[in-house]
Image: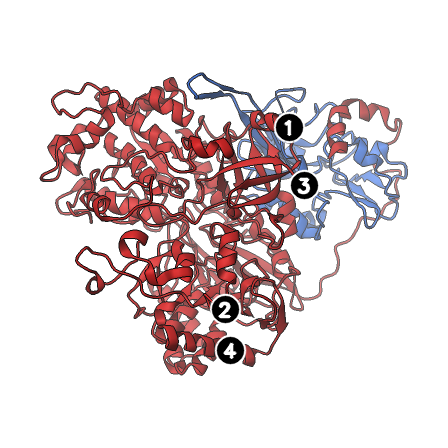
Chain colours: A red, B blue
Amino acid sequence: MERRSFLKMSAAMGCAATVTGCNSSSSDAEVVAPTTPTTAVEKMNWSACLVNCGSNCPVRVYSKEGVITRVESNFTVSDKYGDHDVRACPRGRSLRKRVYAPDRLKYPMKRVGPRGAGQFERITWDEALDIVAEKLQDTIDQYGNESVHFTYDSGARYHFSGTGCLKRLMNLKGGFLNSNGDYSWSQIYEAAGKTYGSAGPGWQGSSVSEMKNSDLVLMVGYNPSEIRMSGSGEAYDFLSLKQSKKFKTIIIDPRYTDSAVGKEDQWLAIRPGTDAALFEALAYEWITTNTVNQAFLDKYCVGYDEKTMPAGVGYEESYKSYILDNKTASDSTPGVNAKTPAWAAKITGIAEDVIIELARELAAAKAPFIQIAASLNRQAAGENNTRAGYMLPILLGQLGLPGTNCGGLCKGSSMTAPSMPAGSNPVTKGISFFTWTQAVEDGKNMTVLSDGVALPKELLDANGDGKLGHDIKAIINYGGNALINQHSDVNKTAKIVGDESKCEFILVVDNWMTPSAKYADILLPDVSWLESEDLVNQSYAAGDTATLIQMSTSVDPMFESRPIYEICVDLAKRMGVEAEFTEGKTRKDWLDGFYATAKAATPDLPVKEVMLKQGIHRKYLPDGSYIVLEDFRKDPVNNKLGTPSGKIEIYSSQLAEKAKTWKLKPGDVISALPKYVPTWEGFEDTAMKEKYPLQLTGYHTKGRAHSSFHNVPWLREAVQDAVWMNPIDAQSRGLATGDKVHIFNDRGTIEVEVKVTPRIMIGVTALGQGAWFQPGGSVDKGGCLNVLTTHRTTPITKGNPQHTNLVEIRKA
Amino acid sequence: MSNNVQYGFYVDASKCTGCKTCQIACKDRKDLPVGINWRRVYEYGGGTWTENADGSINQDVFAYYTSLGCNHCSEPVCVKACPTGAMHKRREDGLVHVAADLCIGCESCARACPYDAPQIDKDRKVMTKCDGCFERLAEGKQPSCVESCPMRAIDFGTMDELKAKYPGAVQPNFAPMPNSSVTSPNLLMKPNRHARPSSSTDGKVLNNSEV
């Protein structure tokens, strides 16, 4: 690198000083142009990248004699926007390296060393499946189905032969412990549920396409260019609309993201976890300048002011009273604790005059499109952060109309492709997805009011409380890395998972020796996507183009790997439920049946023989451009929301009740109103900042999708795994780009490179999440962010606050 | 130049998000190892931060990406620097190629090129570089990087075609590249709105480890 940097500076003189007088044409060199290698019979099969970025991109897999030679993307049409290619991102284009990664799992294996040490011995499929069937049956017999837990997974989003097969098997055997929510959006589900009456508006807001009807797009944490990278997905939709429609774009983020870099009209750097303070200052500005949409608030909402409070609740508990810090409805003079821009400037880092101008611009916009991204929900006060963000469109009455959004993530277009039916789970008890380590340690004593355990009504006591009554004794981990890497506090998690006296059996099914795979008792090799046949759709957030992809393969399963469907058939045989599992169908019967269902839903889907050649069937906005809450806006009487009042609930009576009854840790807040809450390890945690002065937030790096693709060296080279640090913070620590640093707090230490860049807020650091944990020493040289994150939960959903961290950083 | 045809690239830096798909697609075509990148994406940025008395912040940060392969220059300094004639410019299409059998791996070309286009293969001790996907051109296809770009920010064609297709395109006189007068690159650009001129000291390359 030094050589090249030097060259850049010296290039101008270099050309003159090097060899002069040489001919620059090829006439002197007698050169035979290299020829393209003669091709044996090259086959092309359509496959897909089934990773959890929100898009399933089609890929064209070229192979010779069963060996993949290259991967291309989808180039079949004019590529005019609206009828454009679905182009894979660098991850999809590197799939050949992933299939042939050296750490590919080859054979069934059983653990021979201590759990987590990664010591395994090869066994036969028969032996492996005998052990799995016996251990699962033993767990059910001895501890009950509630003791079997599926860790969250999203690394292999097959429709036919995926995680649904294992859940189907377990449901036929009496079920498993329910796991509510997920690492992505739990606090969004809750915020949207309490505000808008269902989770839908939270993760399925207006289409990206509605930006064409907007004059101001406000992206709070929204970063499609790094998260939704597919070349037909949100990143491309956003870019295409931005460049053709010229709406103003304001991005609020601690990082100057790749969704900015020239596409933004304004970037406001903000401290992580303080967004709600900004939102409250905007509310203050609108209230004090009479620019709230009072008619909308009166008609559609509960809890804004004295006119719409629930029975028995006074003005002093209204949103307006809270923002103004004034208990008297008839007098709107702000109190000393009013949520002024000056107050918010200190907290957020956004200057007072900038906040005032932002408020003015949003109020003046004809159709502001406001998106509150999922980054705000993965914070210590994630539910409140998100609810506070939803107040922006609500206060302005800017939702349910063309060009607007309710604050939710953008709804992706979709076409139907069936998935293996998992059946229904006979087990009624459940935990938050994020509390499973607690349930391994002491699930028996986890309760409804302290730990968010879900119990059927008949098991609740007079206070609405009750105990789970089971510990997790067996874990099934399919195509996921939340067993170790993607859960919080990896050192603590590894200890809990590694204790063979607690969880007695761990089954891992994967393609590679991931950090989670190392903790398996039995480790089974799945086939990869490029060795599979399936009919998949575009996934859950692929922007405005819906797709169906017919995957096929000319590559045999590597080594002894097998599809999970076949594995489950053999397990079902051993566990006495084969007939119920297969319903008497062959693999082909299932696939043909799924295809028929897809074709019934999308009649112009070509027949399968055609799709095997054509690969992809696509439609731009098959159901039109979606405007979230449009029906409710048009007719709130006949289209009531799912809230108790049927209206938008600014004040939530359900949360008021929870605030009274739930047992919370000190500092945790459940509130009827959306509120900015200063939290532990937040910007305002001055006590902890004496020891750990830097905020550290995770983000989605382009070089991985969560932890998927970490084992592809091309991607490690293309996207540096380094902690971002502002030059001012780096200077005070004597750090320069490329230095190895230790990032540490009370939970652990990781070693990574530092990237000193002006593209991040002062006092804030950021690291792409998903790098693979390397167990062993006291310092994780794998650079896994989750060594530094906590098991402590958010107040309501008991979800993951993985972006709320305080750390210190020193030269390694 | 007596070339009948001169191929070149067009890059729209207002679209580029720095995703590196071009780089990876290029590597997949020829199975290039880590360390050899026929196409690279440079992150250039700068700006200053000041902290106000109330804890709020002011900043004027900017950044943008530039995707570069080989510009198959009309005055290729790599060709001039090559002591053996291995590095040569093809008459038929203007592409600059390396004749591997003539290359002695001295890296003179790499030292001369201000765009980092020549990429040494240390194992084989031979220079390698973007070959303009000449075999794909013969099949009527675009280069891998062009077809792969999710943002449709890269194009390729004869310079006459590109000039006609992108009448507003300009010479690539933007940091971190040198002024185009140095090598007469066959590269046309639509600059990012944050683009700084070649000589600018406003920013610097922020991703040296990636290029």
Residue of label 4 = A131
Residue of label 3 = B39
Q: Earlier in the sequence, mark 1 or mark 4?
A: 4
Q: Secondary structure at mark 2?
A: strand
Please report contact status of discs 1 and 4: CB closer than 8 Å, yes or no.
no
Question: Are labels 2 and 4 on one chain?
Answer: yes
Residue A812 can be seen in this image: yes
What quarter of the picture does the C terminus of chain A occupy?
top right
Residue of label 2 = A507
Q: Quadrant of residue A682?
A: top left
Question: Are labels 1 and 3 on one chain?
Answer: no
Q: Secondary structure at mark 3?
A: loop
Mark 2 or 3: the one toward you: 2
Mark-to-mark CA distance, 1 and 4: 55 Å
Where is A92 relative to A520, above or below? above
Question: Are labels 2 and 3 on one chain?
Answer: no
Mark 1 or 4: the one toward you: 1
Where is A693 relative to B54, above or below? below
Residue that appears at 32% across and 23% down? A359
Residue of label 1 = A734
